[in-house]
Every structure is written in C-alpha cells, then in structure tokens.
Amino acid sequence: QVQLVESGGGLVQAGGSLRLSCAASGRTSSNLPTGWFRQAPGKEREFVAAINWSGSSTVYADSVKGRFAISRDSAKNTVNLQMNSLKPEDTAVYYCAVDYGPTAGRRTTDYKYWGQGTQVTVSS
C-alpha cells in the first residue's frame, strides 16, 4: 500500500504562483511514476503532468506546458508541481497519483493509488 498526501494548495490571484507537493509513504513507495491530475466542478478529472521513476522524463498537458513544472525530490520522497502564471481556468482540486508500472501515463486508469486532493483557486 502507498499513501499519498498533497499540500500547497490555496487561493491566488491570476498571474501568481503556487507549489504543490505530493508526499508518498508506505512500503515500496520510493521513486514511483507519478502523475498530477485536476478536477474542476462539473468536469472530468484531467491530466496535468507526470514524471517517471528517475525524474529524467516528464510530460505535460498542452494547457499547462510552459507554465507548470513537475519535479522529484528523491531524498524527501516527494513530487512537486510548480505552477506559474496561473489562470482562473486552473481552478480545480489537484490530485497526485502513483503506480508501480514502468512509465508515467496520462490516463487516470494508469494509476492505482491516489491522494485526497488539494484545492487550488485562482481569482481573476
């Protein structure tokens, strides 16, 4: 079992920045492929970014490319999502997810373990 806890959400004005963190714990929870997803009210959960087990490969949704950056801190067993130039349409609950598979996918079905989410609200 893997437990995930997200932190760093909050309220920010458009153009501002936030840094989300995903802390993993439990047996064999180190350096797992990790994805960030988000879900706005009334919408489906959507892919944001993902990073492979070593941190050498990252992928992003087109909507956040160039504004968001995902990174891994292996010493702390965390995966961070730096979010810059935030827009009101980035408002959502952000979730991190991990799996034991070889790659970090873009689909929710690629991940078995999920955190509880952290709210990000961007005001205009």
Image (spheres, rainbow, N blue to C red):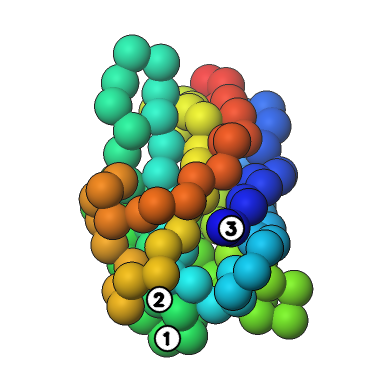
Whole-Å distance between the Cαs marked 3 and 2?
17 Å
Whole-Å distance between the Cαs marked 1 and 2?
7 Å
Q: Amino acid at mark 2?
A: Asn
Q: Amino acid at mark 1?
A: Ser
Q: Which mark is residue 118?
A: none
Q: Residues within 10 Å of mark 2 (few under 14, many from 20)?
A: many
Locate residue 99, reporting x and y percent: 41, 63
The structure residue drawn at horizontal position 40% and vertical position 23%, both measured from the top left corner, is: 40
Q: Residue furthest top?
A: 42
* Left or right for 28, reference 98: right
Q: Is residue 117 above or below residue 24?
A: above
Determine contact: label 1, label 2, CB under 8 Å. yes
Judging by the rendered image, the residue that carries numbered circle 1 is 56
Q: Relative to the observer, which residue lies in front, 33 or 36? A: 33
Judging by the rendered image, the residue that carries numbered circle 3 is 2
Judging by the rendered image, the residue that carries numbered circle 2 is 52
Is label 1 or label 2 in front? 2
